[in-house]
Image (tube, grey):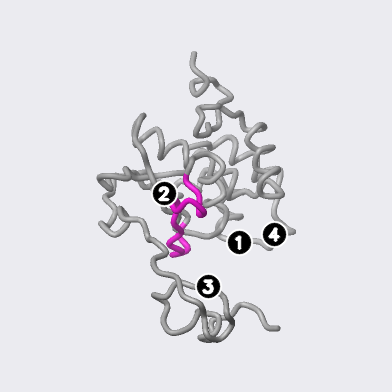
């Protein structure tokens, strides 16, 4: 019996190492700081997308939310924000797509709200039906574990052609405002000096 056919199998990483629910929870805790429910759900989402895509496919990833799912992708695949193989298109939908780098053919996995009726604690968490402090964490994690991949729906998709090309930095210039290097395609000065600063001095 292969690792991913065991009764206690939860997900696997890019090296093919299989994790139980508890092992994945520890992996999540070490990486994310705590076992966030969205990240625990994200493990089997990535697994379902990868297994549906097929073995041997070189893939990139898109997450449709900034919350938790990007960390699941980065933990379990070679796709990361840093290497550009993971993109976040933040529509706020709890979904991800893994797709063939060359053809754009992919599999989209999303949380299916119609399946949450059987998992009331997950439904309460996801739809924020109660304040966090009033939610039953034990029931929530128990339902996540029990449900596994049963919470999701999948569909075949083809990503837009622009996702098949990598965005390159391009020419670099010295900003006349701050004196730091920046992509010259941003204009006559860096975005910070154009008013898009995220900090004040």
Cα–Cα span, label 4 and label 3: 44 Å
The residue carrying pointer 2 sits among few (fewer than 14), some (14 to 19) or many (20 or more) residues within 10 Å by Cα, namely: many
Q: Report which quarter residue 51 is drawn in.
A: top left
Q: Residue at x 35, y 30 (%)?
A: 56
> Badges 4 and 3: C-beta atoms under 8 Å apart?
no
Residue 113, visible in the rendered structure: no
The x, y position of residue 88, in whole percent, is 46, 59
Using residue 20 as the reference point, say whether residue 155 is left or right of it: left
Between 120 and 40, the residue placed more toward the observer is 40
Q: Which residue is mark 3?
A: 181
Residue 87 colored in magenta in the image: yes
Q: Residue at x 52, y 53 (%)?
A: 82
Q: Which residue is mark 4?
A: 132
Q: Which residue is mark 1?
A: 129
Secondary-structure class at tag 4: helix
Mark found first going from the N terminus, 4 or 2: 2
Region of the chain picked out in magenta, as a range: 79-93
């Amino acid at each position: 019996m292969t690792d991913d056919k065991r009764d206690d199998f939860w997900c696997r990483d890019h090296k093919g190492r299989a994790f139980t629910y508890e092992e994945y929870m520890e992996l999540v805790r070490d990486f994310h700081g705590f076992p966030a429910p969205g990240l625990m759900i994200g493990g089997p989402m990535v697994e379902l997308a990868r297994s549906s895509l097929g073995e041997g496919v070189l893939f990139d990833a898109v997450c449709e939310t900034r919350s938790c799912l990007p960390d699941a992708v980065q933990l379990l695949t070679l796709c990361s924000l840093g290497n550009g193989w993971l993109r976040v298109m933040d529509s706020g939908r709890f979904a991800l797509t893994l797709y063939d780098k060359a053809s754009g053919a992919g599999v989209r996995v999303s949380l299916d709200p119609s399946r949450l009726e059987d998992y009331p604690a997950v439904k309460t968490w996801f739809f924020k039906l109660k304040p966090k402090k009033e939610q039953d964490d034990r029931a929530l994690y128990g339902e996540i574990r029990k449900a596994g991949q049963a919470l999701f729906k999948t569909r075949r998709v083809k990503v837009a052609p622009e996702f098949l090309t990598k965005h390159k930095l391009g020419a670099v210039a010295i900003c006349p405002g701050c004196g730091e290097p920046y992509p010259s395609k941003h204009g006559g000065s860096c975005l910070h000096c154009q008013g898009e600063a995220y900090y004040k001095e």
